[in-house]
Amino acid sequence: FKCCFVQFGLHRMDSRNEEVCFKWPYVNLTVKSESVSGTLFLLNSDTLGATLQWIADSDFTLDTNSLPIHLTDLVSVDRRRLRVGQRCAIVLLVLKNGSLYGPFEFVKGGSTDFIDRLSTFVNLKESGTSSDHFIVQPKPPLYQLPTSSNDPYTGFTTAIQQVGRRVLDTFGLLPGSDSFPSQNHQINNGRTSRSRRALAQANRNMNYRITCDRAQLLQAELSAEEEAGYQVIRRTTDRPFIELPELSMAPRQPPLSLDTWQKHLDREGRVTVIHKLQKEIFSGGVEPELRPTVWKYLLGYLKWDFTSDENTKRADEKREKYHIIKTFWKTMSPKQVRYCRFYRERVSIIEKDTFRTDRQTNYFRDDADGNLARLYDILVTYTFYNLDFGYFQGMNDLLAIIMTVVETEEDAFWCFVGLMERLVSSVFTWSIGWRFRRITYLRDALV
């Protein structure tokens, strides 16, 4: 849209449109102990009004801070200096629902300009305790729209009455006009008073007939819509009472133990009564020390009806195939990389997401044990294994959970392949936004 961009005092106006946009770059937002760089926007449009929105410079995804908020939802604004004498300051916004928006760190200054621009849309009143703490008050409107009453035809009737008053004023019959008869003259001449009353009664009758005609016309329009196949929805104050049934919590069963698992294996290592075993896993889960084995079956890496020797042979073939795919992209020449755009784009995203993966856990806190490097290799190898699907943000979090259970790189890759095969059929045809949302739901369920 046509807008006005402001950056530390420099601005450009476009008079063809009244929509205005102010922006402050180099504004960091701290999310989960990680500082993310972005740009803070203050927009004013005829449709949405004045809103605030922070957008990250990278493809970092947030939950609520990336959503625009209306200035009418602000309660207070708090500005603080990080250190004495420094230009950098943080601004924290408090909303009506009690949530916080921010804090926003103005790395290269601009917090004062932000407060000044904000005060043009709302009243900022300094609190008595601190000069940097402001109470937000709405600005009074420049004009007041006429209020509506219970009668939907009040405005129309008032307009007719105003026309009637102008007609009476023209003939000198409106009280207060120069030619309006005095009280003595009305007493002496009863016919003048009677004519005034008759004219006022005629005016009221005319307004009543206009109102009735308008009501009949509106009813005819509604009837025509119903006959045309449209259903007219009318508001009612009577809300039906719906009694919901009580929800009973499903009892949690004990997790699958090693003894129970071995009871389901025959002499050659095949899993017997698979349906019953899967039901036990669904109801109680799996004990931690048994998960590296059971997850390989659940994710399709190992087969339930294979013997131990057949699954061992299958695993060896899968590991060899993984190293073939990994060696292919590892040995690509710089020229091949330059001519492979999809590889460069996907690797660029994977590199960023790798160093964002669960850094608060000991497993991915640093790369001393090579866990981040293995996660990176598995994700890049998967992009060549499944060229159509490739890579999307959030897949690194799913793989991280598998790697904490299945520690071998080759086994973790094929377990990850089995998990993604279940997702591709239902996610691949959706939009990118739905893919992110579904992957986030799945990650929360696994955790």
Image: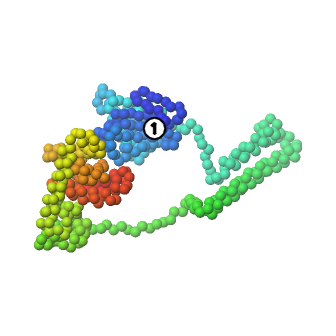
Q: Nearer the viewer, residue 127 or 393?
A: 393
Residue 403 place in picture, x, y as percent = 19, 53
Which colour style is shown? Answer: rainbow
At label 1, counting other C-alpha atoms closer than 10 Å, the crowd grade (few under 14, some 14-19, many 20 or more) is: many
Is residue 219 something one can see in this rendering? no
Q: Which residue is mark 1?
A: 43
The residue at 35%/29% (across/down) is 109
Q: Nearer the viewer, residue 258 or 270?
A: 270
What count of labels does the image hold? 1
Is residue 430 placed above or below 304 in the rendered structure? above
Is residue 73 placed above or below 293 in the rendered structure? above
The residue at 41%/32% (across/down) is 114
Tell me which amino acid carries mark 1. Answer: Leu
- The image quarter in which residue 16 lies: top right
Q: Quadrant of the C terminus?
A: bottom left
Is residue 147 something one can see in this rendering? yes
The residue at 54%/63% (across/down) is 238
Residue 408 place in picture, x, y as percent = 15, 54
Is residue 70 placed above or below 261 in the rendered structure? above
Q: Classify residue 327 as left or right of residue 436.
A: left
* Secondary structure of the residue carrying numbered label 1: strand
Residue 116 place in picture, x, y as percent = 43, 31
Residue 225 place in picture, x, y as percent = 62, 60
Is residue 48 placed above or below 9 in the rendered structure? below
The residue at 72%/46% (across/down) is 160
- The image quarter in which residue 220 lies: bottom right
